[in-house]
Amino acid sequence: MNLVIALLSTEQYLSAERIKSNVMGYEGSASDEAFSRMFERDKNELRDLGIPLQTGPSPGSTTPDGYRINRDAYELPEIDLTDAESAAVAVAVQLWESPELTSAAQSAVLKLRAAGVQVDREPAAIVSTVAAPSRGSEPALGKLLTAIEQGRAVRFEHRSSATDPFVQRDVEPWGIVTRNGRWYLVGFDRDRQAERTFRLSRIGDDVAAYGPADTVSKPVDLDLQAVVDRIAGAPAATGTATVWVAHGHAYDVRRLGTVVGTRRVGERDGDLVELVVRSRDWIGRMIAGHGADVLVVEPDELRTDVLARLRAAADRTEVAR
């Protein structure tokens, strides 16, 4: 992967010597012969994968001793995502904006630059109107993800509700999934000898991984989402709401409800969508995230809540004049 990134990031052909000294993974070669064997193996693997590896003269040379990847031939064509796939990508983008994961991503970029790979310093901004799930404890999230990746058990404090005291838990973590706007850890509770789920917002920051790596893994064919759905149970509905959704917008809102009519608001056409409200806070955040593309028709309490969120966001936003 480091070799692919390096050869994609240059317009000039890179000589084997420069690759050896600048691309992470080759600098520890015991000898030139060892590097040559490793480099030949990697080149063959890239070609087997269909990656268009080109050869040509490196700077200062007249012989084809350099390498690069033809970006035009390597890049994927335009990707056409479904509504569900677009929503998943948007949620993932917002998750990676968390302090824990942003730090990890920045660390990876620094390592690539230190290895001589030039990467974009200002990646294109991605704007999402999808309401991201509440991540709960950011430090706990990062530590749990690391423990899951390493295959290690964890100990942490957890409470069953916001008013209950914290209790020490000893868990084999299998994965983290989201349900109804909340993140859950799924794993095996060693003390209770049973499968359990833990809402991340109720886990303390002090998560400690322990034991050897690669000793914990998710059972084969286990559906983590099904586990959370079964244990967490369907939340009780608290009523219904009717919202106006502009044509061509807010597909996530449309999927949650039923179209019951059409209406023109100002100069825009849209649909009236009836929603089942299970969490007024969550649905208020989701609607506010769509700005003028979704308007609450009723109930009045939800409309007031959304307006308050939008005004609060406007007060925190600096408008360039």
Image (cartoon, rainbow, N blue to C red):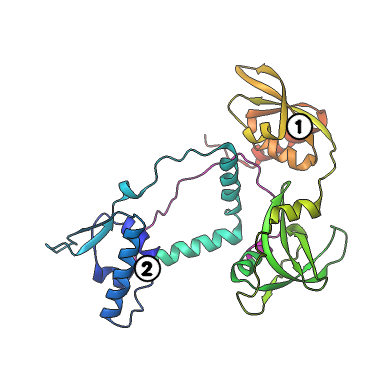
Residue 298, picture quadrant: top right
Residue 100 left/right relative to 58: right
- Report x, y in % for residue 198: 76, 60
Observer able to see residue 117: no
Reply yes or no: does residue 114 show up in magenta: no
Give the residue drawn at x 63%, y 64%: 145
- The secondary structure that most of the magenta stretch takes on is loop
Q: Amino acid at mark 2?
A: Ala
Q: Residue furthest right?
A: 164
Which residue is more in the foreground, 183 or 55?
A: 55
Give the residue drawn at x 84%, y 39%: 237
Which residue position holds label 2? 115
Mark 1 or mark 2, which has the lower sequence index? Answer: 2
User: Which span is picked out in magenta?
Assistant: 115-142
Which residue position holds label 1? 275
Circles 1 and 2, Cβ within 8 Å, touching? The answer is: no
The secondary structure type at the circle numbered 2 is loop
314 up-or-down from 35: above or below: above
319 up-or-down from 20: above or below: above
Give the residue drawn at x 65%, y 46%: 132
Residue 305, picture quadrant: top right
